[in-house]
Image (cartoon, rainbow, N blue to C red):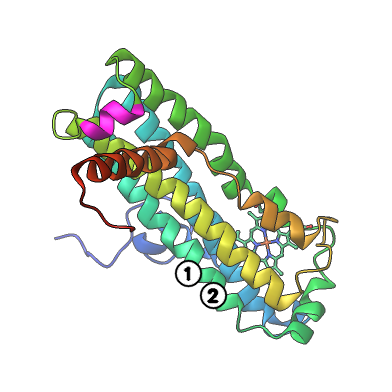
């Protein structure tokens, strides 16, 4: 009988777990403790590296979802969008871990960052790339069904699959927004809101970037729905100011 403890996969590592996940390489990607400018640098690197991995995973699933939308596979697209959105919750949560670094300690780490800046984050840039392409695939389907966004929301039972995709796209948009919001708060509390970053971008610009939305029409349709409901209630002599 085979010894189940013996690795059978190719590659480095004492076990198949380590070989499959390439943990030797993965765990050697952080600075060695003797290279750290400050002991908090381990947390700083691990948070950034984990975020990059999760952003990569999310962008991959978002692109698969885009393919499914284009093929009319709305159920599968919604499932993949849900998965990507769940992955994005972690980089958002990890930002809070870095709030435990004190401003003085951060400047010791920052001295070793060169011109390194999140503006060059491959994972975040991948999200910015896929966002509009997902939107194009969605609007093409809407167009093909001869529906406006308002029609889709009014007839949500009839077009359940496409409506579900729309809501999951909204979740994605919200997560990018939430990432930017919590990241702005992190930058404000660590380096301050009135300074420039390692790439020369004023922190204030992070504030402006928060205004950006991928799917503005999906947000705006709620205003139209409420305005219509208000008008109908006024006509009927009932209503609420909320
Ligand atoms: C101590 C923690 C952090 C500080 C003080 C900080 C600060 C900043 C600043 C000042 C900028 C503006 C660009 C520039 O550098 O000049 C920026 C951009 C950015 N940072 Fe961070 N950051 C921190 C952590 C993170 C983490 C953990 C991530 C996760 C990947 C991240 C991702 C980004 C992204 C994606 C941008 C571009 C933002 C956008 O396009 O809206 N940052 N950061």
Q: Residues within 10 Å of mark 2 (few under 14, many from 20)?
A: some
Residue 196 position, x and y percent, is: 84, 63
Q: Which residue lies at the image location 32% right of the left edge and 27% below the top edge? A: 69
Query: Is residue 59 depicted above or below 191 in this figure?
Result: above
Under circle 1, the secondary element is helix
Would you say the magenta stretch is mainly helix, strand or loop? helix
Q: Quadrant of residue 71?
A: top left
Task: Return the residue at label 2.
Answer: 96
Question: Is residue 151 highlighted in magenta?
Answer: yes
> In the rendered view, does 170 fall on the left or right side of 34?
left
Which residue, given by chain and number where applicable, does mark 1 sit on? 93
Task: Please name whichever residue, 221 or 85, is drawn nearer the observer in this view of the structure.
Answer: 221
Q: CA distance from mark 1 to mark 2?
A: 6 Å
The residue located at (61%, 53%) in the rendering is 210
Residue 11 numbered tag? none
Where residue 213 sits: x, y (%)? Answer: 54, 43
Q: Is residue 25 visible?
A: no
Q: Quadrant of ligand 1?
A: bottom right
Marks 1,2: beta carbons within 8 A: yes
Please tell me which residue is depicted at 35% across the width and 60% down the height of the picture.
Answer: 16
Name the quadrant containing residue 152: top left
Magenta residues (range): 149-154
Find residue 97 and report its horizontal and vertical position in percent: 55, 77
Quadrant where the image shows the N terminus: bottom left
């Amino acid at each position: 009988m085979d010894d189940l403890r013996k690795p059978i996969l190719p590659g480095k590592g004492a076990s198949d777990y380590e070989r499959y996940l390439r943990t030797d390489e993965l765990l050697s990607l952080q600075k060695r403790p003797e290279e750290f400018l400050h002991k908090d640098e381990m947390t700083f690197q691990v948070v950034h590296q984990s975020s990059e991995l999760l952003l990569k995973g999310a962008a991959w699933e978002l692109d698969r979802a885009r393919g499914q939308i284009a093929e009319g596979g709305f159920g599968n697209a919604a499932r993949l969008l849900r998965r990507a959105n769940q992955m994005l919750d972690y980089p958002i949560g990890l930002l809070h871990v870095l709030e435990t670094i004190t401003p003085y300690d951060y400047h010791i780490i920052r001295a070793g960052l060169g011109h390194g800046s999140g503006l060059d984050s491959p994972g975040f840039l991948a999200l910015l790339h896929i966002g509009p392409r997902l939107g194009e695939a969605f609007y093409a389907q809407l167009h093909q069904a001869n529906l406006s966004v308002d029609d889709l929301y009014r007839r949500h039972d009839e077009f359940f699959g496409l409506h579900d995709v729309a809501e999951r796209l909204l979740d994605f948009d919200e997560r990018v927004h939430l990432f930017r919001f919590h990241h702005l708060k992190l930058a404000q509390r660590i380096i301050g809101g009135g300074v420039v970053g390692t790439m020369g971008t004023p922190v204030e610009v992070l504030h402006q970037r928060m205004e950006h939305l991928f799917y503005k029409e999906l947000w705006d349709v709620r205003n139209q729905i409420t305005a219509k409901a208000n008008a109908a209630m006024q006509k009927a002599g009932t209503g609420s100011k909320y």
